[in-house]
Image (tube, rainbow, N blue to C red):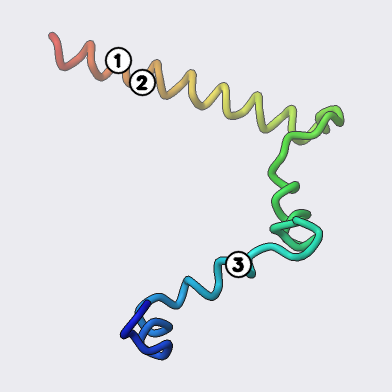
Amino acid sequence: MRGVSIKRFLIAMPFAIVLPMLGNSKGHLMSKRGNDANNVFRPSDSPLTEYEKEQIALRKNLERLKAERLARETAMTND
């Protein structure tokens, strides 16, 4: 860093100051609110509700119908 003013260094490399301050003193990188927000998308061990079971069955049925439709369309184009 000889010959380079600190102001020019800070403008060229602003991340050099931010990197050491990423984590707090406890070693946690995320706040409790951020951690809770990420936990929303983790699978839970609780049993499925009736609504969730219906949605899974509906999705499977739609995928089956789509596969049948695509098979019919490809069969028609091959004829």
Residue at x-position 69% and y-position 62%: 23
Amino acid found under the numbered disc labelled 3:
Pro
Q: Name the residue under label 1.
A: 72
Residue at x-position 75% and y-position 54%: 35
Q: How crowded is mark 2: few (under 14 residues within 10 Å), some or many (20 or more)?
A: few
Q: Is residue 70 left or right of residue 7?
A: left
Snapshot quadrant of residue 58 = top right
Amino acid found under the numbered disc labelled 1:
Arg
* SS at mark 3 in the image: helix
Q: Residue 34 carries which label?
A: none
Q: In this view, does 56 lie to the left or right of 50?
A: left
Q: Name the residue under label 3.
A: 20
Amino acid found under the numbered disc labelled 2:
Arg
Q: Residues within 10 Å of mark 1 (few under 14, many from 20)?
A: few
Give percent across and percent down for residue 30: 71, 59
* SS at mark 2 in the image: helix
Q: In this view, does 37 lie above or below 77?
A: below
Q: Quadrant of the N terminus?
A: bottom left
Relative depth, front residue between 23 and 68: 23
Q: In this view, does 62 lie above or below 71?
A: below
Snapshot quadrant of residue 44 = top right
- What is the distance, in whole Å, between disc 1 and disc 2 at their CAs? 5 Å
Give percent across and percent down for residue 32: 80, 60
Relative depth, front residue between 25 and 57: 25
Q: Name the residue under label 2.
A: 69
Give percent across and percent down for residue 36: 78, 54
Give percent across and percent down for residue 6: 42, 87
Q: In this view, does 47 lie above or below 10?
A: above
Indicate which label's residue lies in the foreground, 1 or 3: 3
Q: In this view, does 21 lie above or below 36?
A: below
Decide: marks 1, 2 in contact (CB < 8 A)? yes
Residue at x-position 32% and y-position 20%: 70
